[in-house]
Structures are given as C-alpha cells and as structure tokens.
Amino acid sequence: MAPQVLESADSRNKFEDLSGVDISAYANPYDALLEACNNEAAQLQIRYGTHRSTRNGQQKAKLLSPDFSGLILDPILQRVMDPSIEPGFVDPRNCLVFWARPPSHIRSLVDQVQQKLLSLAPKLWLMPVPNLHLTALELTHSLTAPQITAIIQDLGSEAAEKITDYTYTHRPRLIKPMLSYDGAALALSFLPGAGEGLPSTSPSSSSSSSSSDSSSRTKKDDEYTYHHLRRDLFNIASGTGVTVDSRYVVPSSHITVGRFLTQEDHASPEKMVRFIELIEEINGWLEKEYWPIGDERRVEGEWIVGQERGLDFRKGTLWYGGGETVRLGRGF
C-alpha cells in the first residue's frame, strides 16, 4: 500500500495579497508594492495595515458564518505532537529560510498573548517561545534533505553571510502589534514603522544603522522598511542563480503563535463567538499598551529587526520552529 500523503493545514489555507497590488509583472515581487507606494514608509504601513485588517475581517466572517464547517486542523502537526496516531511518522517537508528572531521583549509579549489565548482555547498548540520567528525570506519548502543541501551549496557562503549579517547595517522597525488569525492558526503581526515617536534628528552623532543604541534612531531611519529588507534579501539570493520559491509574498510581517489541533475548544457557535471576542479584547489591549501614541514612542511594542541576533539561515523540518541553523548573523 502506498504511504498516505498528508495535506498540511497551510496548503488548504489561502494566502492572498489584500493590499490591492498586482505582483505578477515583477521579477522581484517586492518591487511592486514599493513602486505603488513610491518607496514611502507611511504608504507601505497603510498597505500592510489594509492587508491585515481586511484579512482579519474576512476570517471573522468565515469563522462566525452559519456555514462554517470547522477549523483547519493540521494532520502533520497532530502526528508530530501525538506519535500514537502514526508511529514512526516523520515530517517529510524540508525547507530553507532566513528567519528574523524576535528580541527578548517581543518574546515576552508573545508569551503573554499565548497565555491569554489559552484561557478559552486550552488545547491550542503554542509555538514554543524559543522557536518564535518571522520569515524574512523563504527560499524553498517541502523538499528532501539532499535537495536542500544542493541549494545551500548553490547559494554559497558569501551570499549566506551577506544575508544573515544584512540587518546589522539595515535595520527596519516593526510596530503596532496585533493578533491576526484564520481557521488554521494565529499570529502576532506588525506594521512597518513610519517615523512614529521618533525625532527628526538624533541627539547622537552616530546613526541607528551603525549604533547599538536604538534611542538614537530618527524618522529618516524608518525610510528603510521591512518591505525594503525583503526586496533586498530576494535580490541577493536570486543574484546567485538560486530560484526563490516562496509560498507567498503577501504584505505581512507576522510571528506564528499558535495552531489549532482540535475542534473541541470551538465546538459551538457560542464558543467561537467568545473566542473572536477574546482576540479582539487582546488586540484592544495591545493597541492601548504597545502602540505609539502621537509623539510617544513605545519601545516595548516595537521590534528593530536584527536586535540581539542577525538573521537565522535555517534548514530542515522547520515548519513548527525546529530545524537546524546553517549560519546565524551578527546582532546588535
């Protein structure tokens, strides 16, 4: 009998760009949004925010619809977490990525959010805090280990070093954390910073692109956004001749915080209504406590990519935060 081929939750979950931009005509898909926004951070933030709020609205409507047939459960994660389902099962999907690792204060924030979610979803699978990551660039996915090894060799050590160390000198800021969700998972998402809470000039003579002190950051530093970073990483990688085969390139910067493994916590419309209310309560708390207000900067709710660690070049079965580091970049 042929082995059972399992369909992952992500393969059944549609990821579409809801920012209103068509990337099909661009060799580098990240150029499309940058061009549409005239490279302006404020406009990029609006597009990222539009994508985030529109998708949350769509997912809320689906989950609360009378026609809702159930959450999208992940059969592979179920087998990883409960070996009795299929003894000897091994996740066959080898991937190759560059991850941004959240700094300690963002990891702490995720932990708080996760604990709040458990109050109504005690069976929710939580991404282990040490495994938290933001995928800055996905080179490929769902291949065999030998195929991944070949791509690493094709990319070369010079490009790997350049990419992993890139955030030491190119430091985009992410702000305005919010829970994003769908029928398969929940994530803490961010928007590109656009000068909120920053001075026009730095009190320090050194710029934030070379200083380890984020207090020296100015509005001009926010002109280089997370979307610019994604564009640059794509260019460096593809410049080696390697094909960048990302599953999606939507305008989103998110850390997966949990996945659904069972229908039990949401087995009635009433339970789902309450769970959506909890998500919205958490988002209200995040906005009140962690979003910048006027000229007030909320450093506890922002993430300058590259803080503490550079980018993590990661290979293997890393869908749920595992895998093996090929090279870890220089942090600040």
Image (cartoon, rainbow, N blue to C red):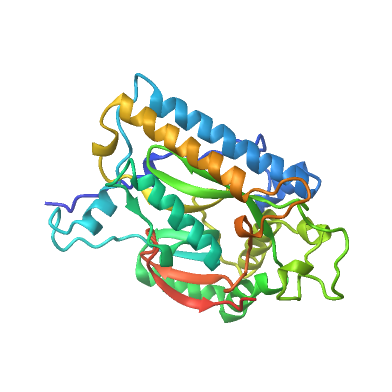
Q: Is residue 94 left or right of residue 187?
A: left
Q: Is residue 72 left or right of residue 97?
A: left
Q: Residue furthest bottom?
A: 157
User: How far across and down, in percent of the image, does residue 174 sit?
Assistant: 65, 55
| Picture residue at 47% right of the left edge, 48% below the top | 187
User: How far across and down, in percent of the image, does residue 262 sit?
Assistant: 25, 42
User: How far across and down, in percent of the image, does residue 115 sit?
Assistant: 38, 51
Q: Is residue 72 left or right of residue 180?
A: left
User: How far across and down, in percent of the image, does residue 316 sit?
Assistant: 38, 68
Q: Nearer the viewer, residue 96 or 304?
A: 304
Q: Nearer the viewer, residue 164 or 237?
A: 164
| Picture residue at 53% right of the left edge, 77% below the top | 328
Q: Quadrant of residue 162?
A: bottom right
| Residue 137 in sight from this viewpoint | no
Q: Is residue 99 above or below residue 115?
A: below
Q: Is residue 257 above or below residue 52?
A: below
| Picture residue at 61% right of the left edge, 79% below the top | 330
> Which quadrant: the C terminus?
bottom right
Q: Residue furthest top?
A: 66
